[in-house]
Amino acid sequence: MEIYDVMRTTFAARDFTDDEVTDEVLYRIFDNARFAASGGNRQGWKVIVVRDPARKKRLGELCYPAMRVAAAQVKAGEVYWQSYNPSSVNIAEAMNDESLKFPLPMFRHMDQVPVVLVVVVDLRVVASIDKELDRIGVVSGASIYPFAWNILLSARNEGLGGAMTTLLSASEPAAKEFLGLEDWEAVCGLLPVGKPTKQLTKLSRKPVEEFVVRERGDGEAFTL
């Protein structure tokens, strides 16, 4: 596919057919995704390919607590899991409140997803330039998410689809034990991959003028 077509049609796919995703296709995806940039070119990523239905199901279950928090925050009129304004929700209580539901059924049927990829980063080599600032760190993601997104772009080029999900990170201690990860490894994303039941070709996004400005944060909109 032409690169701009791939960029404009790679959407968050959460419903898949039963078509197999072969090891050969996955290898080709990873072989191209590995050319993503990372801080210092340290390439601290790792991918765990999960095919066993029971293990996929367990990974889906480990995402429930984060969805419960999201449901509680939406109910409270908040933007869920945002990192600037303090939440009125008791996070620990919400994570264990099984009465809270969130409309993402894929996680309850994760065992039926053709293949699940867990993306991990080695914190010993990741570049975290903003770690001393008095806010939530975001710069570390620059060393792992370009790689994760390359996986999804490569999957689209193969006629497949997937979604960038981060709910598993809220249950990282349990996930790390389940996956046999080391102390210095962080769970960055869970990517379900398969052939979408429907391929979207027109995605809804803000126009350039709404998010690009000239010279300063309060500058005039960038337009032609």
Image: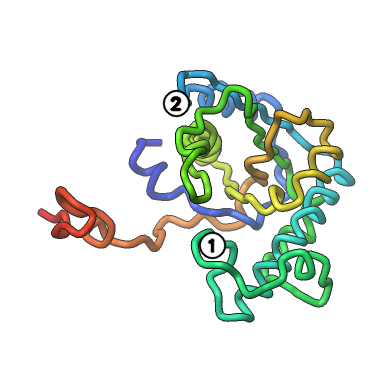
- Quadrant into which the N terminus falls: top left
Seen in the image, is 27 located left or right of residue 128?
Answer: right
Q: Compare residues 75 and 195 and report the one nearer the observer.
A: 75
Say few, some or many: other residues with alpha carbon within 10 Å of mark 2 (under 14 / 14 to 19 / 20 or more).
Answer: some
Residue 101: percent from left, percent from top:
74, 73
Camera-near label (2 vs 1) is 1
Seen in the image, is 39 located left or right of residue 86?
Answer: left
Image point (47%, 26%), residue name = 38
Q: Quadrant of residue 68?
A: bottom right
Residue 37: numbered disc: 2
Residue 169: percent from left, percent from top:
69, 48
Mark 2 / mark 1, whichever is N-terminal: 2
Q: Is residue 208 visible?
A: yes
**Count of labels shown?**
2
- Quadrant into which the C terminus falls: bottom left
Q: Is residue 158 visible?
A: no
Residue 185: percent from left, percent from top:
70, 31
Seen in the image, is 50 located left or right of residue 200?
Answer: right
Residue 82: numbered disc: 1
Where disc 2 sits, the SS reads loop
As drawn, the residue found furthest toward the top would be 41
Image point (76%, 51%), residue name = 171
**C-alpha gap between disc 2 and disc 1:** 26 Å
Say few, some or many: other residues with alpha carbon within 10 Å of mark 1 (under 14 / 14 to 19 / 20 or more).
Answer: few
Q: Compare residues 50 and 9 and report the one nearer the observer.
A: 50
The amino acid type of the residue labelled 1 equals Gln
Q: Compare residues 131 and 142 and report the one nearer the observer.
A: 131
The amino acid type of the residue labelled 2 equals Ala
Where disc 1 sits, the SS reads loop
Q: Quadrant of residue 47?
A: top right
Q: Quadrant of residue 52?
A: top right
